Image: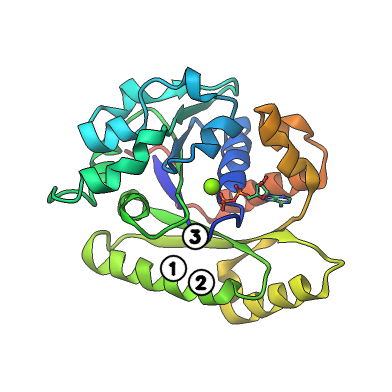
């Protein structure tokens, strides 16, 4: 199983939208996929169609009580896509784990062995706290959604420093699969310029696929379905399918390995 963390400490940059739609695209491609919601706000869980009342066991139970993922993950309406949901009690997890020696390794431990998935995507909260640290420690690789706006690169350097620290202390194998430019608006010269700057600065690390600003992507969550199902032909859905295809070409050949 390939473990992919989707992280950026900035809020509202498209992490959850990317997690939902790339997970859906991978599942549609025939990959047995697990999406892990690691944000106490639970937007990924809601957006995939699992309301708070439908959530039983959650990522909190896995992290804090060491409950097995196999017992806490649930099926979604989307064939081939399971969800480990987040509940509000996850917001207390950082405090509850603070004195535990293995606090940064809880998710890594939980994802060991063959869980029957080809890939798992971890939707991180908008911070570099213990939850994101667990995701980066557990992950093989990191996908960074980057909103095309003026301060995008500043936030990115802080994230890349964190990645380096995690590589040194917790997870030397952690890679960066790519940076996905999100909410791109070609009519806006500033986002155009930012996209160009990011590409010249970071080169091939940036996915060729750019996710456009598209209202269908923001409407879909309120209907409890991924945009890819809400309107599979809209520009946002097509972009996420292209991103998933590009992601697959970048992944190592360890899809089936434990
Ligand atoms: P994050 O998880 O990083 O906080 P979200 O994926 O929740 O970001 O996105 C923040 C908001 O922007 C949400 O309301 C979402 O529906 C909307 N959104 C995300 N990506 C796009 C896009 N490409 N076009 C239009 N709206 C988007
Ligand atoms: Mg989010």
Residue with the mark numbered 2? 155
Could you give the CA–CA distance between mark 2 and mark 1, rounded to whole angstroms?
Answer: 6 Å
What is the crowding at mark 3: few (fewer than 14 residues within 10 Å), some, or many (at least 20)? many
First in sequence, mark 2 or 3: give its number. 3
What is the crowding at mark 2: few (fewer than 14 residues within 10 Å), some, or many (at least 20)? few
Residue with the mark numbered 1? 159
Residue at disc 1, secondary structure: helix
Residue at disc 2, secondary structure: helix
Give the number of callouts: 3
Callout 1 touching callout 3 (CB < 8 Å):
yes
Residue at disc 3, secondary structure: loop
> Can residue 49 be seen in this snapshot?
yes
Could you give the CA–CA distance between mark 1 and mark 3, rounded to whole angstroms?
Answer: 7 Å
Q: Residue at x 29, y 30 (%)?
A: 61
Cβ at disc 3 under 8 Å from ligand 1: yes
Question: Is 227 located above or below residue 213 in the figure?
Answer: above
Relative placement, left or right, of 114 versus 232 is left
């Amino acid at each position: 199983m390939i473990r992919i963390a989707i992280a950026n400490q900035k809020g509202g940059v498209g992490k959850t939208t990317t997690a939902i739609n790339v997970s859906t695209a991978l599942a549609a491609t025939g990959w047995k996929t697990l999406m892990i919601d690691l944000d106490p706000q639970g937007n990924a869980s809601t957006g995939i169609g699992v309301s708070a009342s439908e959530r039983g066991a959650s990522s909190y139970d896995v992290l804090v009580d060491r409950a097995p993922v196999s017992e806490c993950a649930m099926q979604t309406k989307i064939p081939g896509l399971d969800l480990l949901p987040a509940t509000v009690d996850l917001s207390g997890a950082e405090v509850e784990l603070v004195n535990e020696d293995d606090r940064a390794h809880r998710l890594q431990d939980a994802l060991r062995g063959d869980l029957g998935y080809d890939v798992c995507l971890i939707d991180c909260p908008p911070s570099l706290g213990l939850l994101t640290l667990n995701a980066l420690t557990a992950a093989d690789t990191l996908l960074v959604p980057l909103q095309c706006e003026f301060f995008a690169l500043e936030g990115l350097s802080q994230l890349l420093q964190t990645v380096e620290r995690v590589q040194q202390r917790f997870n030397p194998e952690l890679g960066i699969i790519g940076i996905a430019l999100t909410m791109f608006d070609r009519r806006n010269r500033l986002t155009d310029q930012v996209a160009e700057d990011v590409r010249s600065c970071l080169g091939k690390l940036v996915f060729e696929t750019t996710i456009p600003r598209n209202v269908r992507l923001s409407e879909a969550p309120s209907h409890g379905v991924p945009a890819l199902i809400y309107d599979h032909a809209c520009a946002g859905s097509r972009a996420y399918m292209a991103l998933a295809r590009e992601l697959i070409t970048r992944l190592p050949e360890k899809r089936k390995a434990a």
